[in-house]
Amino acid sequence: MSQQSNQLVLHDDVHPYLLNATLFTDYAHKLRTITIPEGHQVTLNSEGSLNFPIGSIISKTFYYPKADNGVLKADDDGSLFKPEVGTRGGLDLGKVRLVETRLLVNRQSGWVALPYVWNNEQTEATLEAIGDIKSLELVNGPERRSFPYIVPDQNQCAGCHGTSTASKSVNPIGPSVANLNRNGYDGNQNQLDAWQADGWLEINSNSVPAMKDWQDTSNTLEDRARSYLDINCGHCHSEKGPADTSGLYLDIATKHRMRLGECKLPIAAGQGTGGNKFSIVPGKPEESILVYRMTSIDPGAMMPELGRSLVHDEGVALIAGWISEMEGSCDNSPSFALERSKERPQAVYGR
């Protein structure tokens, strides 16, 4: 990236991309890019994951649109302000506030996470291995919110991107083949097909699945909710992820309803239960631990535990609506029977 005429401009070998399902980060917008070494290709492995060649760089620049008075705007739907569309660069620095740029660099030793923080003049981003905290004020509709925007430190970046407890290796999360399978910034061509035509990708869009856009109301509520949980929670809450011991798996591959949280007792949630018994109570989002943790900003209870200081109102509404439409009861579930057994007085034998 470079600056020209008060624009943040991408170099010719940098490919901007869009995702079907996006992570919530305090309503920040994100400019995502991939750079591949010349003469190399991205391939698909036997598990359906993308293999990026050594020397690849994935970047994500976090920014907020500014209103005429300079106040930062939430603009969560992403349709109000897209300066990068149709251009090679496209971020008008007079209209946005740059906050941070996170890099994933694929070296011989594996992926390395590098957090960079932009100065107030938006002229330079500096590597901050220990992270940073920015005091920001955000307008979201009629509401103004002051909050600490937390730039994760290098270890926290590696912790979230360490999607396998076995290997503990750092891996990209957002740019999966299913999440990339959509039209790009020009709006006319699938970006996987465009990259294949450019010669740096060996994948045809018709041969791979596509993640559902959780913001697209034409998709089913089930698909939208599962997509949201996958991108926001599934990298930790999966069979191989750092939260595997919780037994709560929120990735898109999980099909078992109790593993998804239905009538599931928490293993070690502590204060994170909010006094509720089950991760999800069908038809009752107000009694579901999952919704409670999404609405909390208490560091000891909130989920995700990193990456946000604000509640994602739209995300909470989506998951609450999904739970509201679930049928069934936890009264006769195995988890309920176990919970009731804990409440019964235990027999005492002998003295």
Image (tube, rainbow, N blue to C red):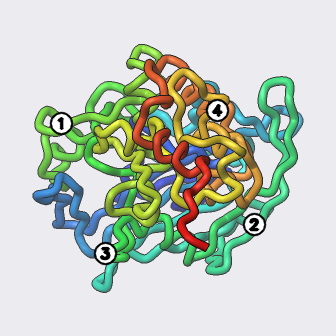
Q: Earlier in the sequence, mark 3 or mark 4?
A: 3
- Residue 200 image offset from top left, x and y in percent: 19, 55
Q: Earlier in the sequence, mark 1 or mark 2?
A: 2
The amino acid on which the numbered mark 1 sits, given as a three-letter code, is Ser
Label 3 vs label 4: CA separation?
34 Å
Residue 296 in sight:
yes
Whether residue 40 sits left or right of residue 91 in the image: it is left
Q: Nearest the camera: 201 or 149?
A: 149
The amino acid on which the numbered mark 2 sits, given as a three-letter code, is Asn
Whether residue 133 sits left or right of residue 196 in the image: it is right
Q: Quadrant of the C terminus?
A: bottom right
Q: Nearer the viewer, mark 4 or mark 1?
A: 4
Q: Nearest the camera: 77 or 348?
A: 348
In which quadrant of the rendered view does residue 348 lie? bottom right
Q: Which of marks 2 and 4 is nearer the N terminus?
A: 2
To which residue does mark 3 refer? Answer: 166
Label 1 vs label 3: CA separation?
31 Å
Label 2 vs label 3: CA separation?
38 Å
The answer to the question of whether label 3 and label 4 lie on touching residues, with beta carbons closer than 8 A, is no
Q: Which of marks 4 and 1 is nearer the N terminus?
A: 1
The answer to the question of whether label 2 and label 4 lie on touching residues, with beta carbons closer than 8 A, is no
The label shown at residue 252 is: none
Q: How crowded is mark 1: few (under 14 residues within 10 Å), some or many (20 or more)?
A: some
To which residue does mark 1 refer? Answer: 205
| Residue most extreme to the top | 218
Label 4 vs label 1: CA separation?
41 Å
To which residue does mark 4 refer? Answer: 287
Q: Which of marks 2 and 3 is in front?
A: 3
